[in-house]
Amino acid sequence: MAASSLLRSLTRHARGASAYHHHHKTWSPFSTAAAAAAGARDEARRGFPGLGPTAKGEKARVVVLGTGWAGSRLLKDLDTSGYDVVCVAPRNHMVFTPLLASTCVGTLEFRSIAEPVVRIQPAVSKSPGSYFLLARCTGVNPDAHTIDCETVTDGEKDTLEPRKFKVAYDKLVFACGAEALTFGIRGVAEHAIFLREVHHAQEIRRKLLLNLMLSDVPGLSEEEKRRLLHCVVVGGGPTGVEFSGELSDFIMRDVKQRYSHVKDYIRVTLIEANEILSSFDVRLRQYATDQLIKSGVRLVRGTVKDVQPTKLILDNGEEVPYGLLVWSTGVGASPFVKSLPFPKSPGGRIGVDEWLRVPSVRDVYAIGDCSGFLESTGKDDLPALAQVAERQGKYLASLLNRAMKAGGGHANSEAEADPGPPFVYKHLGSMATVGRYKALVDLRQSKESKGISLAGFVSFLIWRSAYLTRVVSWRNRFYVAINWLTTLLFGRDISRI
């Protein structure tokens, strides 16, 4: 039914292309419906079918690229009574990233932190003109108000070749996130595992459990056993610290009971070039350091210069053998974002003004980790945090809803709506868990300001309560609560599936 509905929509939009009075004429140079239909058929024969421009009397179309924090919040809050929504992304779910580290060691199950797009915005599965398209955007034509897309078939066997198609938009929102920074260090992409997606967590869990089982094989040398069971985390930000804490908890509470033959070989090393948790209060940083050391995590200050299949080399020449290498050193602009024909912020992201608009073109916006303020605004790039992205998505949904109600929802609309107040970000604070039922809560608005900062078991309860309430749906809140209770009563699941 969904496929036939999409096919009918593609046909309808192709036929109505010439009647679209809001777009530039570059979409169809013909003036008659027959010529437009012929053009559409020619386009299809060349292998580029797609969703054509919206016709007069139809809802305006908002195309959202991405299903991260920013894109998902935008999808949730958009008024679908006045907009058709088309989401184009390589994954059909949002990941609740603050709890991603917990899935690596079995504290939580993967499905508990993944929220399907159709639950976030039901219109993409119910409304005739709204869709979720499993694809990547490969290019944009701002003059024609179209994007080029290619379907995603990564990792699937016996699938068709990727299909290319176009999607016309009235409003286009880039919410495609960022990618992990490797700083050009040789071997990182080939040998390290990042921790940004569910499949990364799955890979870490499989690798960790595989190494545990391989280390029990008779005849393995002491040196090789120590290498296999050495888990190295590079990056002392919240993700790296939380993963190290979860891993040390897993070792102390589960591995030493169920893998007693190798319990004295497994260890965790956290490598950071500067201070761990540099954005937190000094007192909290020291508390985190003490807790990690108490949990058996070795802290190393240094910079990685080279990564090889079984070891990495630091700037002081020290060689660090590893069996599992997790890389968590921040994020930066992706090659796709760098390739876009828009001005960039000083950090290389898509440049936006105070209303999150891309000022060099009409009807294009950027939110989340892929966007940054242009130098002309006098504002610094905001940190790549979930709370920043979510609030930008909420703000932009409100802006677009107001524009639609004022008659400015369609592309190049003559009825320009007042955009309202500019986007202002107010930091709500930071939290991180360090294992052993301990956490940090820093409620200062900036590093320089004063505010409440807590550490210990009470902070752990605050951390869990806050994230449990932030999980998108009641369904996943129930899953997370049950997973936590199951882990407390029976320990973590160590099945390698």
Image: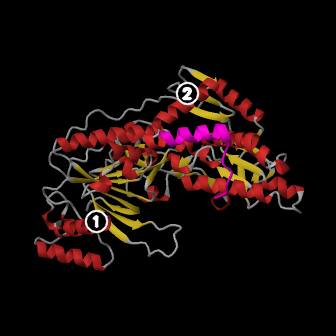
Q: Specify start and end residues of the magenta stretch as a single range.
A: 477-497
In terms of sequence position, does the residue under pointer 1 or pointer 2 come before the other? Answer: 1
How far from the left and from the top, in percent, is residue 369?
46, 46
- Residue 495 falls inside the magenta stretch: yes
Q: List the residue tagged with mark 2.
A: 462
**Quick one: label 1, few (<14), some, or many (20+) residues within 10 Å?**
some
Q: Which label is found at residue 125?
A: none
User: At x 52% / y 73%, what residue is drawn?
Assistant: 157
In the image, residue 143 sits, relative to residue 396, either above or below, namely below
Q: Quadrant of residue 23?
A: bottom left
Q: Is residue 367 visible?
A: no
Q: How crowded is mark 2: few (under 14 residues within 10 Å), some or many (20 or more)?
A: some
Which kind of residue does numbered mark 1 sit on? Leu
Question: Picture coordinates of residue 332 (x, y %)?
Answer: 52, 49
The residue nearer to you, when weighing 349 against 376, is 349
- Mark 1–mark 2 Cα distance, whole angstroms, equals 45 Å
Question: Residue at coordinates 28% horizontally, 40% vertically from top-left?
Answer: 399
